[in-house]
Each structure stands twice: as C-alpha cells, then as structure tokens.
Image (cartoon, rainbow, N blue to C red):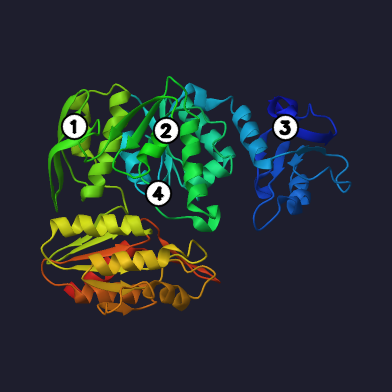
Amino acid sequence: MKYLDELLNIHESLSWRGDLHVPVSGIELDSRQVGKDGCYVAIKGFQKDGIAYVDDAVARGASAIVSVHPPSQAQPRVTWVQVKNDRRALSTMANRFHDDPSRRLHVIGVTGTNGKTTTVALIQALLDGSVRTAAIGTLGMNFSGQAKPTKLTTPEAPELFAFMADALQAGCANLVMEVSSAALSLHRVDDIAFSQAVFTSFSGDHLDFHGTMENYLDAKLSLFRKLGSDHWAIVNGDDPMGPRVIRELNCRYITYGFSEPADIRPLKYSLGMDGVRAVLQTPRGKVEFQCRLLGRFNLLNIMAAVSSALVMGIEVDRIAAALGSFLPVHGRASIAHAGDFLVVVDYAHTDDALENLLKSFREITGGKLVLVFGAGGSRDKTKRPRMARVACRHADVVVVTSDNPRQEDPQAIIADITAGFDPGFTAFHVEPDRRRAIALALGLAGKGDVVLIAGKGHEDYQIFRDRTVHFDDFEVVREIMGGRNA
C-alpha cells in the first residue's frame, strides 16, 4: 500500500488540508476511473477543468484530491493538496506509485514530426531477439504476450508508468516509445529516465497546440536535454534541424542519413515494389539486408533503428536477420491491393510526410500517381495549403476529400486545401465523402499506376462534428475492388 505523503513532492505543494498519510490505491486523472482510496488529480485542461468532477471522484471513493485550486469547503472530509503544477504532480505521483519503473528499464525515446511509429516498431524488432523489449506509441502499448490500445501517441502518466511496471514484471529489459511534442510540453514524461533518444525529422505540424515552430522545436529538443553523459542520441543528419539537436547534447551521439558525413549511411541501395535492399556503412562494419518496407523514407527509418541497435550492442548479423523478417507496420505505406495497379494506405498527414511518400513512390513506379488526401479539422490549419502544393507538384492526379473534419465544415477544410494548389493546376477532383473519393481514385487508376490514400493509415474511424463513425481505408479498398472483380 502506498501513502499520499510518499507520492507527493511536498516542495511543489502550496498548501494542503487533512491527513497526508492516507492510503492511496491508485492515481487517476479521470474521475470515472477512481476507486476506493484512489487519488484524483484534477487537471485544469484546455477545454475542461477537472475540478468540476471532484464530487464524482469523492463519491467513487477518492481518499485525496490534488489540484491547482485551493481546498474546497464543499468536500471537508477528503484530504486536499494544492500544487503549483498539476501535470507535473501527476507524473511524479504516478512514477512513485509504481516504484520508478523506468530506472529499471533501458528506455529509448523516439521523437520527430514523421517516422516515429515505424522506427519504434523497427527498434523493438531489432532488440527483441536478444532481450524482451516493450513498445509504446500510436499503435498501442505492447510486449510479447500483451497488447493494449492507446488513445494518445504518448499516453498520460498513470497509464505510462503502469505499463512500464507490467513490462518489468513480464521480464522486459528495454522499452522503446514514441515521445510526442505534446507529451513533452505537458510533463507526461518528466519522470522517465531515458537512456537513448532518437530524432527522426522536423517539419511543420501541431501549430494549433504549440503556436510557433520554435515552440514546437523546443518541445522536441527538451527530450535530448534530459540525456546525461552516459547516454546516446541518434540523430538524422540529413534533416536541417539535425545540427540544432546536436548542439543541445551533453551525451554521446551517432548520426545517420544518405549524406557522406553520416556515421551510418548506405553504400548502395535499391528500392522496389518488393521493398528495399541495401548495404549500410556503420562504425561496426557493413550491414547488408533486404526488408519489405517500401520507399526511400523507410530506408531512413531503418537506418535510425540500426543506429539504435548498434549502440545497444546488437550484432550486425542479428540486425540483418531481423530486418529480413520484419513485417510492414499497418497503415504505414501498407499495400491494400495489388493487381494491375497498386493501392497503398499511409498515415501521411503533414506536407513533409506527403512529399516523402510521393517522392518515394515516384522512384519505384513508371505509372502515374493518384493521390487521395484531406486534412484533419480542428487542427493546425497552416499545413493545408502546404500539403496542396506538395500534392500538385508530385502527384499526377489528386482527389481532395475529408480526413476527420471534427468540429469544422468539411467543405471549408477542402477550400483551404485547394487554395494552395499552384495556379493552373487542374488535375484534381473534390469529393468530401471519403468512400466515394477512394472509389473515384481507384476508377482513375490503370495498369502500372499507384493509388496513394493518405492521412488516416491505421485509423478505423472518421470523426465528424456530431458523431464518430467506423471507417477503415483498407476495408473500403477491399470492398470496392471486390465488387469490381465480382
């Protein structure tokens, strides 16, 4: 049993009322999850204030309330602690409740605008053959024998530390995780002891949250500032922000990329519809491999993972074998149909990711590229015209549609996108209904072409103002192509 005074950082507390030595059975920020003797941390959010749900938490058995608000007279019998920063307190308390699990794991954090999910999956595959390795990210939290879905790329602190404790109990020695800029800004990972951090890329996104590109970059850089002299940073040397990351470091580092100064780079490589073949130059010798991942951008992800594995001491031949058996990540340049033409589903939802996707498939197909894409509503609007410019310059035909419009009018989002097309570009169609848009694109494809359906990837839902409906790009492609072949 844990007690509140063991979990709190008293120096961060402003005041309290009641007995601090009360038993705590769990740390929760959702009042609906509070049980008997639970501690409810009432987070003051951007849209809602958790203080509104204190009565619910107490009714469910909360023994303590932690909040930025002073103790409420409406709940005189429950222990109440006022703190300076509720999210920082949440991280500290969740970590202490689970006995500081990250210090008993080798934790690798992967951050960047694009490439995080595939890179995490690759690193897990390269390490898992030697030592049991857990992973956290957009596709969930997992280790061999257990998988849990997540709502966030980097979950909230109570979920994070609880999973780490489970991973330790299951015999995991390593954890590789996606670290989002929001998680860094909102203190979710403050108490995680990272041993290694990987920088994949940096481009415009999430300005609805961060406000400026500098704020967004600074959030990413804060992960690397956490590293000490015994730790490692893995840096994409081809990215313009790579040198900026390196300047922040107080640890050892290794770079990867296509350019000659990179520590890990391809001596030769070939890209095709069956994947990538390459020979990498590394400080530990050459790594020759074949992998089923598609596209040049995935070769960068592979190099990031190889860099991480090498500094962990994984042997070159073991790395090559793991890459050979690696299965593509669902929704990341995944083939949804192969016949006269290829249909690929990808999560690309920024201009940089879209450009990488289009350029990669331009390299490996002689046919035309038909692109289906939209932009998420209630999110960074500045990327919409940038995505349009990329689309019209690299795709032969573009179909603009909806992608989780949320609280916005789908037609207004589409108007923001089409306004970004180059003057004179007419090879585009507008179809707000995503299913019809996909059907339209498939109807435009001929022998040898590639249809790229971007934006949603692994997602199996579509979010509208008043409802969320089931929608899976893969399922839609199979249904349409099945009907066509019938």
Q: Quadrant of residue 77?
A: top right
First of labels 1, 2 by sequence position: 2
Give the residue at mark 3: 12
Query: Disc 1 vs disc 4: Cβ atoms closer than 8 Å?
Result: no
Residue 85 appears in the rendering: yes
Q: Secondary structure at mark 2?
A: helix
Image position of 123 with respect to 362: above or below: above
Q: Could you say where residue 439 lies in the image, as x and y percent from the top left?
A: 27, 75
Give the residue at mark 1: 321
Q: Secondary structure at mark 3?
A: helix
Q: Residue furthest top?
A: 230
The label number, if any, that marks residue 113 in the structure image: 4
Image position of 276 with respect to 97: above or below: below
Q: Secondary structure at mark 1?
A: helix
Query: Disc 4 vs disc 2: Cβ atoms closer than 8 Å?
Result: no
First of labels 3, 4 by sequence position: 3
Q: CA distance from mark 4 to mark 2?
A: 19 Å
Q: Quadrant of residue 385?
A: bottom left
